Image (cartoon, helix red, strand yellow):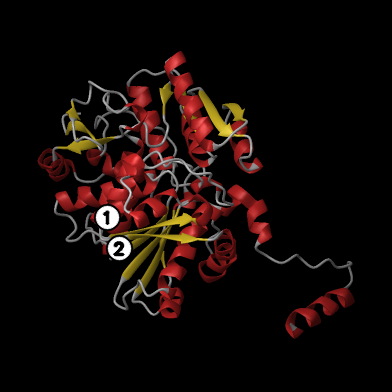
Amino acid sequence: MDHITALQCTICGQTYPPDQVEYVCPDHGDDGNLDVQYDYNRIAHRVRASGLTGHGIWRYKALMPIDYEAPVPPLLVGATPLYQSERVAAQLGIREVWFKDDGRNPTASLKDRASALIVARAQSEGRQIITTASTGNAAAALTGLAASVQMPTVIFVPATAPEAKITQLLVYGAHVLLVDGTYDDAFDLCLQATREYGWYCRNTGYNPYTAEGKKTVSFEICEQLSGQTGQFKAPDTLFVSVGDGNIISGVHKGFKDLLALGWIDHMPRLIGIQAEGSAALYQAWKMGINPVDMQPIDAHTVADSISAGLPRDRVKAMNAVKETGGTFLTVSDEEILSAIPALARETGIFAEPAASAAYAGLLKASQVGLLDREESVVVLITGNGLKDVASARKAVSQAYKVSPHLDDVARVVSRIFRD
């Protein structure tokens, strides 16, 4: 991996050779998140020589922290659709609105991108067992990708995680530990087990390579917006829901890579959307608190995938918003739930609560005047609605019950169209 130059601490800026540290900066413990540094000239030379080839995220393998010839999991991750909605754009009075539907990944969330890379790295390093803590999606992504190469997984999730997500883990054959506590409790317990048993840890905001898998969504968005294979065009603004902060960090890193390579001509503005009941980063941003000094909050939201008392990738997430001239917004659980059917009826995309939060954020941004009429906006939909059907049911009306007779159908039809 001669295109990787160093791993840099996001707190102190200290750099380390890639083979010297595994997860975090030794001087800052579990909070010392590392950022992967690249030799962009070497990457550009590789791409000029070999082009962008392969399927899904591996089309961008030359820009990822893995040997170019290393084997990768067989499941197709990435290459998810980007849909334009002229109707939503007209309603909001802006030039373009696009929706990136990452719920179309193999385990139905964007987090497959990170897990595919982590599994590939684990294979190349000869690891035997991978572990992670998760509210559900990261765990499902890991267990699905690991199952595709027959690698065992041990998963720590809060016992309150949606039943559908827990079931998904068990179907993939994971060893699931339901933690009687919060996501943050599960995260800390997973780290303890990692040290005790020597498992390879995928934890978000701890393993520095998770964001490097997630950044591929930015590559895809820009290539799709250009309308030409091998060409890239950046949007003006991107909306992304934020919990631990790793997705917005990865999105930011992807755009930084493209800008460093000269493949896009500007950095998009990143708008991070948090649930009101899990808004640690929003509060820190609003009050001017250094993310290093943030304290845990008691996080509660229907959007379990973005519920985090102390965001683990908070430094890079804050940088992503500040360095792009972006902002954080919060949306209520009611707005999140309402956005599920609203998005589905406007676009045909069924989003889980954490993903619909980004659409709720777009609507709020429009209401408070944050959008320009000439903007090109992308909304990142991070997970499929089938992940949490129980929440979706709260946002819709009940079905009509009828007897097997046409006159009963007529009664319902009359009521529907009268209403």
Q: Residue furthest bottom?
A: 418
The residue that appears at 25% across and 37% down in the rendered structure is 11
Q: Position of residue 16 (x, y in %)?
A: 19, 26
Residue 1 in which image quadrant: top left
Side (left or right) of 181 relative to 17: right
Foreground label between 1 and 2: 1
From the viewer's side, name the closer residue of 313 and 419.
Answer: 313
Residue 54 in which image quadrant: top left
Q: Which residue is mark 1?
A: 322
Label 2 crowd (10 A; few <14 / some 14-19 / many >=20): some
Q: Position of residue 417 (x, y in %)?
A: 74, 83
The residue that appears at 42% across and 26% down in the rendered structure is 201
The residue that appears at 57% across and 58% down in the rendered structure is 333
Amino acid of disc 2: Leu
Side (left or right) of 69 relative to 89: left
Side (left or right) of 201 relative to 260: right
Amino acid of disc 1: Lys
User: Which quarter of the image is occupied by the C terminus?
Assistant: bottom right
From the viewer's side, name the closer residue of 241 and 409.
Answer: 241
Residue 273 in which image quadrant: bottom left
Q: Are marks 1 and 2 in contact (CB under 8 Å)?
A: no
Label 1 crowd (10 A; few <14 / some 14-19 / many >=20): some
Q: Position of residue 395 (x, y in %)?
A: 65, 63
Sequence order check, earlier mark of 1 and 2: 2
Compared with 82, 120 (above or below) is above
From the viewer's side, name the closer residue of 143 and 92.
Answer: 92
Compared with 236, 202 (above or below) is above
| Kind of element beneath mark 2 | helix
Which disc, if any, is residue 208?
A: none
What is the spatial separation of the Cα atoms under label 1 and label 2, in whole angstroms? 24 Å
The residue that appears at 44% across and 75% down in the rendered structure is 367
Q: Which residue is mark 2?
A: 225
